Amino acid sequence: MLKKYLLAPGPTPVPPEVLLAMAQPIIHHRTPQFEAVFAEVQAGLQRLFQTREDVLILASSGTGAMEAAVINTTSPGDRVLVVNGGKFGERWGKIAAAYGLTVSELKVEWGRAVEPEAVARALREHPDTRLVLVQATETSTTVLHPVDAIARLTRASDTLLVVDGITAVGVLDLPMDALGIDVLITGSQKALMLPPGLAFLALSERAWRANASAKTPRFYFDLKRERDNQRQHTTAWTPAISLVSGTHAALRLMFAEGLEAVFARHARLARATRAAAQALGLRLVAPECPSPATTGIYLPEGVPGKIVGYLRDKVGITFAGGQGHLKGKIVRVAHLGYIGTFDVVTAIAALEMGLAAYGHSVAFGTGVGAAEAVLMDGMPPVGAV
Amino acid sequence: MLKKYLLAPGPTPVPPEVLLAMAQPIIHHRTPQFEAVFAEVQAGLQRLFQTREDVLILASSGTGAMEAAVINTTSPGDRVLVVNGGKFGERWGKIAAAYGLTVSELKVEWGRAVEPEAVARALREHPDTRLVLVQATETSTTVLHPVDAIARLTRASDTLLVVDGITAVGVLDLPMDALGIDVLITGSQKALMLPPGLAFLALSERAWRANASAKTPRFYFDLKRERDNQRQHTTAWTPAISLVSGTHAALRLMFAEGLEAVFARHARLARATRAAAQALGLRLVAPECPSPATTGIYLPEGVPGKIVGYLRDKVGITFAGGQGHLKGKIVRVAHLGYIGTFDVVTAIAALEMGLAAYGHSVAFGTGVGAAEAVLMDGMPPVGAV
């Protein structure tokens, strides 16, 4: 018997309430019934993004929304600044290059966050930069980038700040309007606790102004057309109906928990995971600027990268391995979305037992105990004894 | 967010494969389609019971099958011997008394198993005893009774051995025919990983002979009529169709794992739970004859019984509390059915954190670590590194 535990940075587990909502019979999307659900989802997404702007719903993966953000705010030849500190930063550059934009790349050592001063320098060097393209959390290196500090730079300039918040929105406090983010993006299969298939993005007023003169070619991802349609509570193209129903259920769960509590939970689960790794004498990939969504942990000497496949196929625990030059060297333990105290306990116990299976000397319970000590912060009071 | 973990001795968690099988559209029960499923379920149940006799399927809880066993093998005034070492032993006496049988009760101290010699003595005292009524595992006290030793006594006499295997069949090796059990009973919501609603029982050849002259009144639970119908792959009364489909899926899962592996898993999870309790300095309810289905653990001084409600309602962990005079004094951690390594890890971490929440001094990870050391036995080999 192999019980399955999905502890990767996306897709993430889907709550039963959401699965059941998506198992309802399909309704037609050109009906008042669907439009009512859609309108509530739109309002919920604005609350989640902490924005007064329209949050558009796309039937695509998060990458589709990244592409939409770039092509709806630029014209061929425009210069963009890509913060590249991992696989997803690299993807920004590939998208921009595919559409003939001029790419300045700010390389960041894997496991480190970008220095805001480096961004400032790059913008001074090229004041004509149209976009800064950055991840809020770079999942490949489990790093948290300082979006707030970068936003302070772009707010004061004509450069737009485009933030890939795919593993950040709903994980940490990222108030779009208050920070002055110009485009904020997320995907369904992360903190939103949905299957993959939807992406969400919102544009600031000045991003919409840029859109009016943006000449980069687009059709499916024409956001102006989407906004015109979505203001009528429908989409330009056929929506992924059951995923929209699922989003309705998922947002309800998130608001029932409360966004502050959701952020605090993610922070606590991340702290517990880091404490466990450190108690086990394991080295973190991003010790100084760790993402609250996923924790990257170096495998100890002598333990091969195939431990990830072993835990997944033989033990039922799906972690992520490393990407690029971290392949085979790290394990990434995710703790975003429908993840709670005992998922972290399970993750750490599996890591302890998996390392022991590969001959690494482990004092069983050391990591779990360190995690529990942190997770106690999330235990509700017992009341009068 | 409250993720729910069902770690009580029934109902137990239902695997997704079984939930999906039960979510299929209802088919009619007087059809070749249903009869084909029913026939496969019957064959699977014979394999599970380790018997060549018919295993009958009743739309009832386990208690219904307990009643059916008694009333189909006795006549009013007949003497039965009840092994009463807990709430379920007590229930045998109540059923027998309700139908005017003469009840000899063998009281057993809670937390202890019945002495086979005490059964032998009672049978010598009343050689006219028609039935010995016993639990294989007494869930209220988390005790394992020595069914094999009792069967050696009844096999050599005219007394029939009726075994409530509700939390034993599919948990431990209880080969009905090889041991000479005369009636073996189980319920759906235990090791069979189904929702409640079905009971299963089989009668030995000599139990069927007793049935021929048994005068105790019965209608719904007339097992002769059931056998006549079920030999045609249908039931006397309307079957619980979706639960039968679920049983089909559940048996398939059990046989895919292999019965030996299923028994070994339950034994290992129980050993791990006991090791954890002992590492935490907690006292077991049944240290000498522990059930492999459920582990009873005394709460330490100063921790009130309401910890069970706290863990259930505030933390999401459903254990069982104590019954009768153990109410408020113990917690029962179940590990039967669709339960694996990380459920035990979760259970022990929740116990550690719950005890700490009530002010008990806990070295976090001590219990989990002791459990992990045992659970390593269940880790598959890593293969060539």
Image (tube, coloured by chain):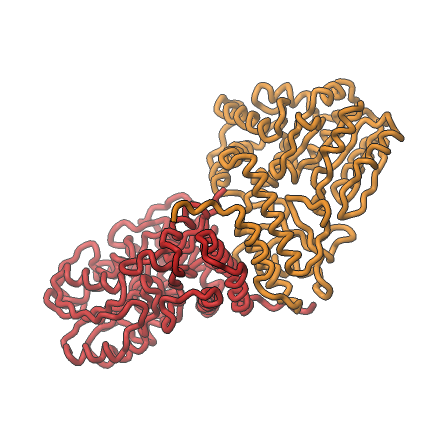
Chain colours: A orange, B red
Number of marks in picture = 0
| Front in this rendered view, residue A197 or A297 | A297
Identify the residue at horizontal 21%, vertical 57% (top origin). Answer: B221
Q: Is residue A167 above or below residue A154?
A: below
Residue A219, quarter of the rendered image: top right
Identify the residue at horizontal 20%, vertical 54% (top origin). Answer: B220
Identify the residue at horizontal 52%, vertical 52% (top origin). Answer: A342
Q: Is residue B347 above or below residue A144?
A: below
Residue B124 is left or right of residue A163, and the answer is: left
Q: Is residue B352 above or below residue A122?
A: below
Residue B277, quarter of the rendered image: bottom left
Q: Position of residue A167 (x, y in %)?
A: 65, 40
Residue A370 is left or right of residue B54, and the answer is: right
Specify the farthest residue to the left.
B77
| Front in this rendered view, residue A141 or B349 | B349
Residue A303, quarter of the rendered image: bottom right
Residue A217 in view here:
no
Residue A157 in view here:
yes
Q: Position of residue B336 (x, y in %)?
A: 42, 61
Q: Position of residue B309 (x, y in %)?
A: 38, 49
Q: Position of residue B60 (x, y in %)?
A: 28, 53
